[in-house]
Amino acid sequence: MSLNPRNLYGLGFSPLSIENKRHAFDEEMVADKRVGLFGIHHSDSESDTSYIVSAEYLGRCKEHLTETINRNLTDNTIGKIYKLTLDDDLIHTVTKTGNVFSNSVSINNGNEPFTVLRFNIDFDLFRNENLIQLLGDDIDISIEFTLKKGGSSKTFMISEKLVDLNSKAYALGYDFVPPGTEGEYEISIDSMTFTMPDGYDNTAYNMVVYEILMTLV
Amino acid sequence: MVKATLVVDQKARMIDATGTIRTSDLIVATLFGADGNILGVYNPEATYNKNDKIPYITEDGELIIIVALHDGVTGPFNKMDWEEWSVVSELDGLYDDYIVLSYSKPSLRRNKVWLEITEESMQEAMEHNFTTNDAGLLIYKNLVVSARKPTMTKDLIWGVITEKAN
């Protein structure tokens, strides 16, 4: 029997979008279709827990963490590195100007003051049509944070070009705390706003934040 | 919901089981350091113990590491409480086990650095009234200390004599 190509049909499938992971079965493939990132959804009905594993994402995060550790070493900003996760999905797409923080996050350091704050954001900015990567020179970022000791607090703002943020470290001071103030030192990151350039078209371009690492010394 | 999760305590990783900053990490931080924030600049309110290390900017603007000479260093900075630290100085305690100084090649060479003493270097040392210590001589075949630079310097470390020993 000869095979007539006209009788052959292809079979295609589309993996479940990561936004719909709540509908995923255990070990079902999910994908962030905006960037083509694949993962396997795991769920345990008994413990009612679920998570997504992605080898590609893990590899990228490992590389990002290594880069951050080395940068801290050479810049002498050696402290604790925190990962700031924006939502439950692996990556976050920035489609327009706005604050990507839905809530502030606080970290307590006991009786030791924080002395240095820095960020390292792993992101991609590319054209959907031909995957040309852009540097993002004209994207601005503003980060609002509050230093606290006891009842005293003061809010500060970091405003930078996104491409410059990763190479900078910010010295923290407590001049606003009256002498003799009791209490523990705390920092809260209140907002993180990406300002996209005028005319930014999120249908033609895609800005993806893979990971945000924060170093506190 | 935005969350912050501690990934790594980088400073804690650099401290070994004895509570000391690892030498390898300290070297890298010293070589690439810029503004003296490696371990925290001198804090007069803190108390430093013997062998504690901090960065220090010299009058010439050079970044060095200094090490406390005794326990209980505190208060206004006093240079007499500190001396410059170097990687080589960490090896002082290894001479007995790892470095052999002798005329003849030791029969057991495993894990040892052998520095050969020669008559020529001995003679020069005597001419310049160099003293010797109880452990042996201070001039070696591949480490020459002399007034004039040797004609053959390949595989040889040369140190010039600048003054007589007291």
Image (cartoon, coloured by chain):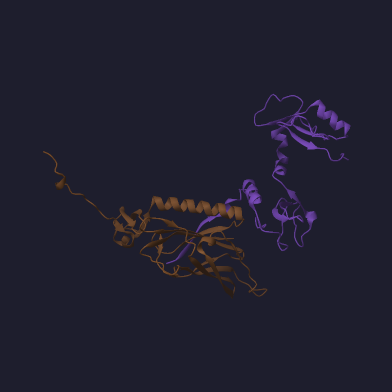
Chain colours: A brown, B purple
Number of marks: 0
**In this rendering, would B160 be left or right of A206?**
right
- Which quadrant does the N terminus of chain B fall into? bottom left
Residue A17 visible in the current orientation: yes
**In this rendering, would A32 be left or right of B92?**
left
Across and down, in percent, residue B19 comes to 63, 51
| Relative to B120, residue A162 above or below | below
| Relative to A2, residue A107 above or below | below
Q: Nearer the viewer, residue A100 or A165?
A: A165
Quadrant of residue B78 within the rendered picture: bottom right
| Relative to B93, residue A184 above or below | below
Across and down, in percent, residue B38 comes to 65, 55
**In this rendering, would A162 be left or right of B64?**
left
x 51%, y 69%: residue: A142
x 48%, y 51%: residue: A63
Quadrant of residue B155 within the rendered picture: top right
x 61%, y 55%: residue: A75
Across and down, in percent, residue A206 comes to 39, 61
Residue A90 visible in the current orientation: no
Across and down, in percent, residue B47 comes to 72, 59
| Relative to A48, residue A179 above or below | below
- Which quadrant does the C terminus of chain B fall into? top right
**Looking at this rendering, what residue extends furthest in the left direction?**
A1
Q: Nearer the viewer, residue A50 or A144?
A: A144
